[in-house]
Image (cartoon, coloured by chain):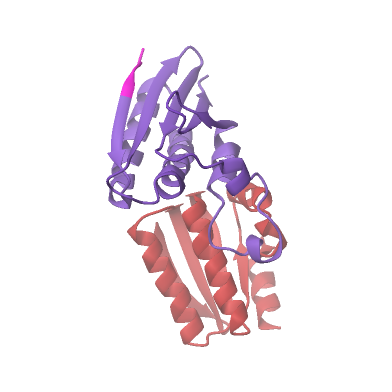
Chain colours: A purple, B red
Amino acid sequence: MLKGIVLKIPSDDIIVETVQTFVEKVGLTAGVSEEDVTGLSIAVMEVVKNAIEHGNGGDPKKHVTIYIDVYPGRLQFQVDDCGNWQPDADLGHDPGEGEALISSRGRGVLIARNLARWLDYGLNPEGKTRATLIWPLS
Amino acid sequence: MKIKEEIKDGVMVIRLSGKVISGPDLMDLKSVFQKAVSDATGNVLLDLGHVSWMDSSGLGVLVSGHTSLAREGGRMAILNATRKIHELFIITKLITIFETFTDESEALDSLKE
């Protein structure tokens, strides 16, 4: 069983595609179907992109750390950044109305929650933002 | 992602297939929308019948294209969104701003009005 995978990446968009490929490979190894694995990687990468942008302000000197563990029946991703932002307050569950609705940004959390069914935000032991995403395995 | 474009009955029809997600391909899609706006083609029909996945960046490009066209008096309609993509439009409430069709002739007739 896959446990204790840790991926530490700089906050740079250039790394995003590589991480997405890695997440898909981990998903397939853990038993996610070919049909669902893109959904998994999109959900995880929405969280990672938010961590890069909102948590670390896109500063390549700041890192995002991704912890991956496989448990019976579930695949868990924990994504830590260096910030203390409040995703539910800053981004919310609601896409908004009017100008907010036609903004070209700000839908990542909604999409990740919809795909993964379980996405929660809290703090890591250092008091920085931690997102926990759980993907059910059949 | 693959992009095909054609003019049909005076409407620019953009057919997408594959994954509409972050990456260099999205710049190509942005360019196609910019072309539709600058060429004053007016209205765009976006065929999503073969799109398997879309992320927030892909949605952002669609919204941006929709807004740019509307600013110039044009319209954008969506054709054949799959169940998965339609669900995405519902959870993001974009279903309230996108016109959606399942029949191409009907969509073209509407955009010609």
Q: Image quadrant of residue A125?
A: top left
Find the magenta span and give its range. A1-5
Is residue A91 visible in the rendered image? The answer is no
Q: Residue at x 45, y 56 (%)?
A: B17
x and y, in percent, of residue A64 in the image: 35, 37
Q: Outermost residue toward the front? A: A127
In the rendered image, the quadrant that contains the N terminus of chain A is: top left
> Which one is nearer the viewer's eye here, B70 or A128?
A128
Please say if A17 is above or below B62. above
x and y, in percent, of residue B32 in the image: 43, 73
Is residue B88 visible in the rendered image? The answer is yes
> Which one is nearer the viewer's eye here, B46 or A76?
A76
Q: Residue at x 36, y 60 (%)?
A: B25
Please say if A101 is above or below B52. below
Q: Residue at x 37, y 67 (%)?
A: B28
> Which one is nearer the viewer's eye here, B47 or B9?
B47
Q: Residue at x 47, y 61 (%)?
A: B16
> Which one is nearer the viewer's eye here, A125 or A81?
A125
Q: Image quadrant of residue B48?
A: bottom right
x and y, in percent, of residue B81 in the image: 60, 55
Q: Is residue A46 magenta?
A: no
Q: Image quadrant of residue A119?
A: top right
Please say if A96 is above or below A9. below
Q: Outermost residue toward the bottom? A: B40
Horizontally, residue A117 falls left or right of residue B6, namely right
